Image: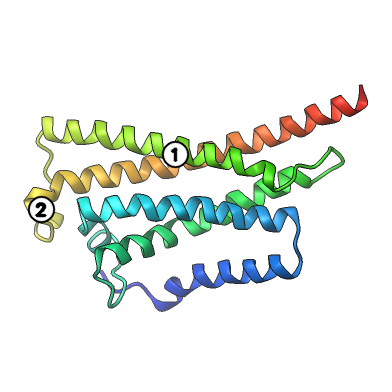
Amino acid sequence: MDPLPWYRIAAAPTIVLALIVYTLARPSTRARATILGVAMLTGYGMLMDQVSVRLCPEYFTVLHNPIPGLTDPTLLGLAWGFLGAAGGGVAMGYVAGLTATDGRKPPLATRELIRPMLLLVGGTAVATAVTGAIVAIHAATFEIHLDPLFAKRIPVERHRSLFTVACYHAAAYASAILGSVILFVWIGRERTKRMRTLAA
């Protein structure tokens, strides 16, 4: 694969830095929630990818466009964890902030979103770990091997690890999306409950 273009490397940190500057200049629940979402998901992504890069570094160097000059496993995991999760973090955080403040119902403060977002990350971690364990067991049981296209570039002893890492990354993305939807529903129901309490 061709090296990852510089603009794709720079886009995520530039957007996050701009969001931080904007939040400091014009603080609001929506802006703070966006930064919180980025911190939660990128933090998890960078931790998860520290495991992934040690199980199978080729997941990042063969299945992804290589990042020029970046070969250290720790830095590779941090970089891809951030790049892979930043966009989702922005989307999750902004929609959570919007859901928490839009309309006439009593709004939720940013601090009230911390615990539910931590639960979201915890649920994603559990789904990732369970998927990884199940796939690893089945990959060994069925003696999974890669297509010859990849087999030439990946040592045979890491074929099953690559398959496992790819599967639990897919589970992480799917569970984070599902968890985000559950978070938004919870925010809406919590605001409705508070409105009914005030009206009683």
- Percent coordinates x, y for residue 9 in the rendering: 42, 72
- Percent coordinates x, y for residue 68 in the rendering: 30, 77
Tell me if residue 146 can be seen.
Answer: no
Q: Amino acid at mark 2?
A: Pro
For label 2, the residue is 148
Count of all numbered marks drawn on residues in the image: 2
- Percent coordinates x, y for residue 42 in the rendering: 47, 55
For label 1, the residue is 124
62 vs 158, nearest the viewer: 158
Residue 97 placement, left or right of 175: right
Q: Residue furthest right?
A: 199
Q: Amino acid at mark 1?
A: Thr
Q: Residues within 10 Å of mark 2 (few under 14, many from 20)?
A: few
**Image quadrant where residue 5 sits:** bottom left
* Residue drawn at (56%, 66%) of the image: 16
Q: Residues within 10 Å of mark 1 (few under 14, many from 20)?
A: many
Q: Nearer the viewer, mark 1 or mark 2?
A: 1
* Residue drawn at (47%, 74%) of the image: 10
